[in-house]
Image: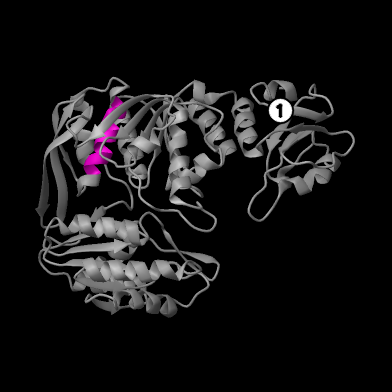
């Protein structure tokens, strides 16, 4: 493939050199420059790839792609583009042979529910005979290969590389989480999603190194609906109208509204010792009874979104219900059986908004006691600790304060910050620094009818202390506690 062939769909200007050279690699990390490569200069928060142009020339790169006025060394081709991140996405798609044209692509965006919705879609489609790849917060799944995730939406080069691997592995579909950061940084450019999904929107990811305002956050989410053929959106969310401004896709809706194309009716909450679930009737595009082994209204929304997608694959209604009944996601309201008397679950809720949503949902099940065990990460905003402490103190009957990922901070200092938030409420609490001992306390002091939540770690299987990640999976801790 020549530079010209790779740049076929790219809007660029040639600053120097020729486009006839054969390309050996596409690179955006200066440490991976090799002779004959195209090096895309990405400007990040801490490092600017434009500073490595001389290095690229010395290492015989075939071309550099820039977005700034820079001095171009002799002997290297240089292309100017308006945005090198966007260019990387377009070039990556070409480099890997436009794999998204060979599979159905589904992108899921929203504040909450992305991970669960993607796994529900994958489960239903695979039950119906499809082979589905997945890219998301927890992992990338390609057949039997599982790749731990560093970002919810990987860099565009990796997205295209994963698509190519999925096509080569025989996948006919890929479902992926499209985060606001991923959309803003053009990680999902270079192709058009067949289906885009909007779950919901609440103020989140606003602050340093994230989004400057809620308006920016919303506008980034809205980008998906100018990058997909069909948009499936939550009819009940107050921000849906704004999300769809300027959309270029066909639109379908789901929700509780009677005007939604796929809707939930007659919702009931199921609560028995050791189990919480939700049942409802799905109407509209499908008409069938549904029971989910996950509590709350948000689980209904997630399942509706998943079903709405599967309709486009010709999946029959009788194939949807049984799969939704069993669909589970690691670390997302994941119930772990420890007793016939009370319910224990693991959830990733790691900020005040997600914790409040979770505890408010569980309150609707009228537990004997609602017990919340959590900690907060070190080297992060102290405000999060105050806020999470206040939320748990207000909504839980008992808070067990413990460690999360203390990183470079002292665990006790983090706990003291959480206690500052709880002090604003009348909530009862205990503090146990060691997370395993805190979980042991929760289990040994469980009472009939309790709902106990281990919040914050979710799917994570490590604890980070002073720059080192130590193995720590709450499921293993629970098994060890029960075993002894």
Horizontal side of residue 441 vs 414, given as left or right: left
Q: How many residues crowd around disc 1 within 10 Å: few (fewer than 14), some, or many (20 or more)?
A: some
Tell which of 154 and 336 is nearer to you.
154
Image position, residue 75 (x, y; %): 88, 33
Q: Position of residue 327 (x, y in %)?
A: 26, 41
The residue most toward the right is 74
Residue at (30, 37) in percent of width and height: 120
Q: Give coordinates of residue 266: x percent, y percent.
A: 9, 38
At horizontal 14% and vertical 55% (from top left) the residue drawn is 364
Quadrant of the drawing holding the N terminus: top right
What is the quadrant of residue 366 in the picture?
A: bottom left
Does 242 sit left or right of 378 as displayed?
left
Q: Secondary structure at mark 1?
A: loop
Who's the residue at 64% across and 27% down the image? 95
In the image, what residue occupies the spot 11% across and 49% down? 270
Q: Establish if 184 lies above or below 393.
A: above
What range is drawn magenta here?
A: 299-310
Specify the color scheme: one colour
* The C terminus - image quarter: bottom left
Q: Is residue 476 magenta?
A: no
The location of residue 224, given as percent across then percent down, is 45, 34
Task: Tell me the chief SS of the magenta region.
Answer: helix
Q: Is residue 384 above or below residue 272?
A: below
| Residue 152 visible in the current orientation | no
Residue bearing mark 1: 12
Side of 364 where 480 appears, left or right:
right
Residue 125 in sight here: yes
Can residue 307 be found in the magenta stretch?
Answer: yes
Q: Is residue 472 left or right of residue 9?
A: left
């Amino acid at each position: 493939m020549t530079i010209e062939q790779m740049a076929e769909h790219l809007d660029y200007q040639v600053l120097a050199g020729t486009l006839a050279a054969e390309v050996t690699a596409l690179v955006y990390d200066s440490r991976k420059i090799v002779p004959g490569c195209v090096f895309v200069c990405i400007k990040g928060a801490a490092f600017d790839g434009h500073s490595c142009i001389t290095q690229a020339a010395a290492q015989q790169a075939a071309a550099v792609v820039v977005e700034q006025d820079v001095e171009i060394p002799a002997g290297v081709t240089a292309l100017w583009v308006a945005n090198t991140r966007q260019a990387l996405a377009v070039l990556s798609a070409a480099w890997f042979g436009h794999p998204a044209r060979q599979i159905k692509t589904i992108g899921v965006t929203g504040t909450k529910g992305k991970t669960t919705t993607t796994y529900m879609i994958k489960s239903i489609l695979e039950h119906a005979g499809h082979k589905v790849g997945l890219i998301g917060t927890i992992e990338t799944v390609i057949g039997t290969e599982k790749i731990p995730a560093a970002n919810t939406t990987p860099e565009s080069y990796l997205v295209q590389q994963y698509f190519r691997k999925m096509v080569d592995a025989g996948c006919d579909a890929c479902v992926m989480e499209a985060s606001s950061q991923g959309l803003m940084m053009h990680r999902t450019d270079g192709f058009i999603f067949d289906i885009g999904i909007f779950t919901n929107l609440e103020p989140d990811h606003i602050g340093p190194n994230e989004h400057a305002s809620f308006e920016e956050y919303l506008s980034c989410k809205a980008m998906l609906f100018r990058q997909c053929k069909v948009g499936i959106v939550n009819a009940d969310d107050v921000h849906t109208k704004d999300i769809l401004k300027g959309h270029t896709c066909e639109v379908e809706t789901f929700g509780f509204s009677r005007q939604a194309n796929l809707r939930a009716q007659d919702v009931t909450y199921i609560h028995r010792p050791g189990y919480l679930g939700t049942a409802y009737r799905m109407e509209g595009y499908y008409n069938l009874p549904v029971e989910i082994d996950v509590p709350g209204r948000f689980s209904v929304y997630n399942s509706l979104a998943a079903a709405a997608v599967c309709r486009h694959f010709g999946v029959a209604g009788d194939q949807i219900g049984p799969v939704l009944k069993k669909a589970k996601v690691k670390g997302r309201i994941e119930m772990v059986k420890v007793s016939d008397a009370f319910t224990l679950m693991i959830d990733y809720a790691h900020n005040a908004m997600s914790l409040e949503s979770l505890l408010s949902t569980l309150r609707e099940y009228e537990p004997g006691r609602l017990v919340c065990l959590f900690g907060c990460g070190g080297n992060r905003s102290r405000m999060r600790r105050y806020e999470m402490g206040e939320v748990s103190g207000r909504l839980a009957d008992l808070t067990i304060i413990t460690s999360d990922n203390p990183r470079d901070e002292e665990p006790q200092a983090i706990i003291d910050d959480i206690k500052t938030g709880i002090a604003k409420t009348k909530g009862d609490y205990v503090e146990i620094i060691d997370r395993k001992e805190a979980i042991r306390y929760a289990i040994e002091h469980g009472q009939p009818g309790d709902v106990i939540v281990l919040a914050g770690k979710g799917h994570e299987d490590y604890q980070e202390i002073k720059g080192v990640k130590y193995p720590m999976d709450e499921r293993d801790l629970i098994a060890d506690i029960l075993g002894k």
